[in-house]
Amino acid sequence: MTRLTLAKPPRARLIPARLGLADVLRVGAAGLSTRPTRVILSALGIAIGIATMIAVIGISASSREQLLRRLDRLGTNLLTVSAGQTMFGENAELPTGAVAMVRRIGPVRTAAATGMVSTVTIRRTDHIPVAVTGGIAVQAASVGLLDTLEGAVAKGVWLNAATERRPVVVLGSKSAETLGITRTGVRVWIGGRWFTVTGILTPMPLAPEIERSALIGFPAAQELLGFDGHPSVVYERSSEESVEGVRAVLPRTVNPENPEEVQVSRPSDALAAKAAAAGAFTNLLLGLGAVALLVGGVGVANTMVISVLERRSEIGLRRSLGATRGQVRLQFLAESLLLSALGGVVGAVLGALATTVYAMSRGWPAVVPPWALGGALAATLVIGTIAGLYPAVRAARLSPTVALTTT
């Protein structure tokens, strides 16, 4: 009699359910929502670090943008020619015909000069001691100086063919402020006689020496103050593309016999250098922001570790219901990333707001580079991943039985 044996049915293999992205985010958000106070305090550290970094970069970028806009507005085609020193170390002099010689250079559009009248001072009245000058220089000026510098008169009028021979003076913006003069028609004491103020200039960033000067015409300076007629500085403007070519020929044109005694400079280079140096302390301040961000990351890690310790029963229950170690690890890593992202978003908003408020208070354009925002948010995700990695691994290693028996 043949015995029949029944084959055992194959054992079904349990496949854990997969967590979608939406499920992971929902589980992570649920874990954070149960402890709102701790979450806010932990996210605050991240927010402070990100806000500091965004504000530092934004304020530096806004300052640099303001300088570059001013540079574009003022132009980079202004050159100045001044006397250097002789081979014996003595102060050299520019020829009296220096302006005329500069104008002979083809690309030069306009040229003018100032000459230091070092033998006299300017005072508000004749009762003020001679030694009290207020740092104001008395200079002879060409009629075409204002056009060459592309400056403007805030009040009154500039020198012309008639007034350059008369005892009249035009004050730079800072010299008028020093003398306490706010209107024209006022008389000042220069070289033992009264001069009438006929104009007050606006600020001139490319010629700050003019701002602290009292300017009178060349003929009046020679006739009334004993000026020798030698210019101290010659200003010239040419087309943008020919600036370097003009710069190369200026010394030999102004002083063919001793070109080495002539110094040529480009005032716009100072503003360009200032714009380049606007972020000189950015790295230092970014380092401080990075330290704050690191401290915030430590706070996130601490929060997640405590969360794992407090939620052992929850972890054991999830494991006993079929959650894998990977899913538990992913849950706590998602919580850490959401916590860091929350701090990063808040910090980015605060940093952009601080940049805007500060820039507007200084009259600057508010500039927050997009790469700074993107980099800041990326940094928060990196911090969140690093801070949550250990707590997530620790949570995944918990045995379901041990976790459920833990009170």
Image (cartoon, rainbow, N blue to C red):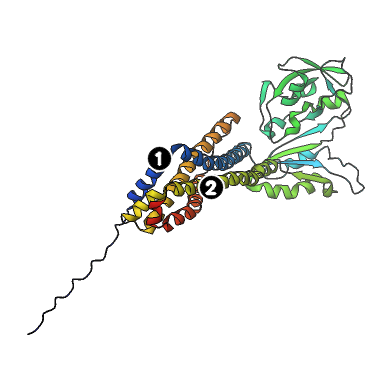
Query: How many numbered marks, from 0 up?
Result: 2
Q: Would you say residue 125 is visible in this rendering?
A: yes
**Distance from the alpha carbon under mark 2 to that under mark 1:** 20 Å
Q: Position of residue 247 (x, y in %)?
A: 72, 47
Q: Secondary structure at mark 1?
A: loop
Q: Which mark is residue 34?
A: 1
**Placement of 124 over or under 318, stated as above or below:** above
Q: Which mark is residue 297?
A: 2
Q: Position of residue 40 (x, y in %)?
A: 48, 38
Q: Secondary structure at mark 2?
A: helix
Which amino acid lies under the numbered mark 2 shown in the image of this protein? Gly
Quarter assignment of residue 161: top right
**What residue lies at 35% left-to-right and 55% top-to-bottom?**
319
Is residue 343 left or right of 253 when viewed as pictured?
left
**What residue lies at 69% left-to-right and 31% top-to-bottom?**
204
Which amino acid lies under the numbered mark 1 shown in the image of this protein? Thr
- Of the 4 image quadrants, the one containing the N terminus is bottom left
Depth check: give the residue in front, 384 or 205.
Answer: 384
